[in-house]
Image: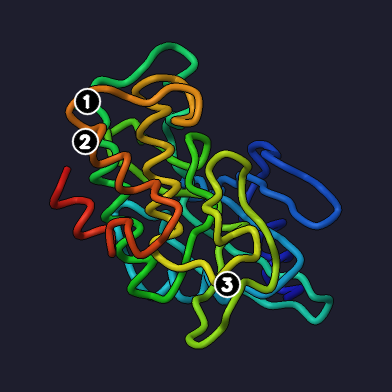
Amino acid sequence: MAWIDDVLKTEYSVVRVLKKTEDKSLVVFRHNKSGKNVVCVKFKGDAEVYRRIERFVCPNLPQVYGTFQGDDGFSVVLEEYIDGVTVGDVLSTGLYSEKGVRTVITGVCDGLGVLHRLGIVHRDIKPENIMITSGGIVKIIDFDAARIFKQGKSADTKIIGTVGYAAPEQMGLAQSDERTDIFAVGILMNVMLTGEHPGRRMHKGKLAKIIEKAIRVDPLKRFANTSELKKYL
């Protein structure tokens, strides 16, 4: 993997460091000739999720340009730099209308639909992980918690997710699947409309029944997939 480090040092310039910890770093680089920005993600672990995404181009997911596995247990991923704001940024200034929620969540459903067809469960859908580009395109970001669905497993190997958005099965009760992400989408919709978790304040408008179905404790009582959720939206 040393060659990719050499390429970044010789052909790219550092724009800014977005995150840097012992196990992960996110750095924005600009190509010296084209002026195009890319994000370099270096993290401890396997890059299988990114390798699967790399094979497809979806407007609602960041484009992955390359994945590299090192002998030191770290992976390096080069992906699209997204110019825009998160849903969390928007919520810091005010709430969404039902029309605005339909627009954003439709894009989220399309992105999740691709992930789920690839056997990937995101497991961390929340305002900070949904971006709106300067061109108005919705993109799902941050695959730290994502995992590959494994047929026949009874539970996730690692309990992970954001408190308030994580579905009950993420607490070790069962294996997470596409309905796990649908639960988080339901929570997200309610927060976008009310500014609060549905446990504190439930939305009372036309989308209330959709939210209620999405966040059922029993996964079998939720929408079966994002296509069904999108149809109801």
Place residue 116 in its image quadrant. Answer: bottom left
Tell me the element at label 3.
strand
Q: Is residue 106 left or right of residue 202?
A: left
Which residue does the image show at 76% across and 70% down from the upper left? 74
Residue to which mark 1 is pinned: 98
Q: Which mark is residue 68?
A: none
The reply to whether discs 3 and 1 touch (Cβ–Cβ < 8 Å) is no
Please report whichever mark, 3 or 1, sits nearer to the chain's N-terminal start.
Answer: 3
Tell me the amino acid under the disc marked 1: Glu
Tell me the element at label 1.
helix
Say above or below: 186 vs 11: above
Sort mark 2 into few (<14), some (14-19) or many (20+) by Cα contacts within 10 Å. Answer: some
Residue to which mark 2 is pinned: 102
How far apart are labels 3 and 1 at the CA level? 38 Å
Tell me the amino acid under the disc marked 2: Arg
Which one is in front, 48 or 230?
230
Q: Is residue 82 left or right of residue 32?
A: left
Residue to which mark 3 is pinned: 67
Tell me the amino acid under the disc marked 3: Thr
Which one is in front, 118 or 50?
118
Residue 227 visible in the picture: yes
Please report whichever mark, 3 or 2, sits nearer to the chain's N-terminal start.
Answer: 3
Of all residues shown, which one is farthest toward the left? 231
Residue 35 visible in the picture: no
Which residue does the image show at 22% across and 36% down from the upper left? 103
Residue 133 placement (x, y as % from top left) = 36, 35
The reply to whether discs 1 and 2 touch (Cβ–Cβ < 8 Å) is yes
Q: Is residue 57 left or right of residue 94?
A: left
Residue 231 placement (x, y as % from top left) = 13, 52
